[in-house]
Structure formats: C-alpha cells, structure tokens
Amino acid sequence: MKIEEKINTIRIGKNGITDELINEIKAQLNKHGVLRVRILRAARISKDRFSIAEEVSRLADAELVLVRGNTFIVQKYN
C-alpha cells in the first residue's frame, strides 16, 4: 500500500471554500497531520486550482505540499 492511499481526502464542491470546510480541514489536520483535498469541477468556476489551494492552505494554517491536477496535499505546520 502506498503512502498516498492512506491519506484522508476532503472534496471542495459547488459551495466552494466555506467556514465549515476550513474547520473540517483543520480538524483532520490536527488528527492526521496531512490531508489530500480534491477540487471538483463545480468549485473551479470562479478561481483556478492554484489559487484555491493557496487560499485553503492559508485559511487552514497549513503548509501546501503539492498541487497535482485537481488535487492538492496540505500538512500541518510543525
């Protein structure tokens, strides 16, 4: 089993970046330390994937590790 298969995943949907989403990302990061976030097509209407990834990591007080396709990985700051 690859490490990437063990990472929990959260999806950003048509509602975009909400307070509830950021709170859930923070909770998952506190629990697991690393998190994969997938950006669904409906969320990419107004912003590109890089700006979404940067905004989420900034709001969640997390470090942006990787952006690949419509998926990015964030980890908790040490």
Image (spheres, helix red, strand yellow):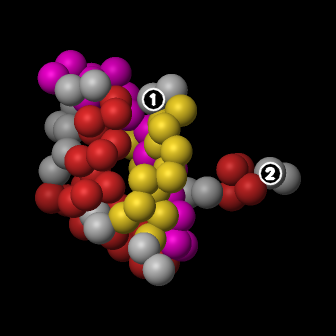
Say above or below: 12 vs 14: below
Is residue 35 one of those drawn in magenta?
Answer: yes
Percent from the top left, x then y, of residue 43?
26, 29
Q: What amino acid is found at the position of numbered circle 2 in the picture?
A: Lys
Say what secondary structure mark 1 lies in. Answer: loop
* Drawn side of residue 4 relative to residue 78, left or right: right
Residue at image point 16% right, 50% down: 18
Q: Which residues are magenta?
A: 32-46
Quarter holding residue 49:
top left
Amino acid type of the residue tagged 1 in the rendering: Asn
Disc 1 residue crowd, few under 14, some 14–19, many 20+, Cα 10 Å: some
> Which numbered circle lies on residue 70?
1
Q: Which residue is label 2 attached to?
A: 2
Q: Residue furthest right?
A: 1
Q: Is 39 situated above or below 42?
A: below
Residue 20 image position (x, y, % from top left):
20, 59
Kindly report the distance in space between the C-alpha atoms of the residues bearing marks 2 and 1: 20 Å
Residue closer to the observer: 15 or 26: 26
**Residue drawn 53% across and 64% down?**
34
Which of pointers 2 and 1 lies earlier in the amino acid sequence? 2
Observer able to see residue 40? yes
Can you see residue 24? no
Give the label on residue 28, or none: none
Q: Are marks 2 and 1 in contact (CB under 8 Å)?
A: no
Q: Is residue 48 above or below residue 1?
A: above
Give residue 27's position: percent from left, percent from top. Answer: 36, 73
Q: Secondary structure at mark 2?
A: loop
Q: Is residue 66 left or right of residue 1?
A: left
Crowd class of label 2 (few under 14; some 14 to 19; many from 20; radius 10 Å):
few
User: Residue at point 18% right, 37% down?
Assistant: 15
Q: Position of residue 22 (x, y in %)?
A: 25, 59
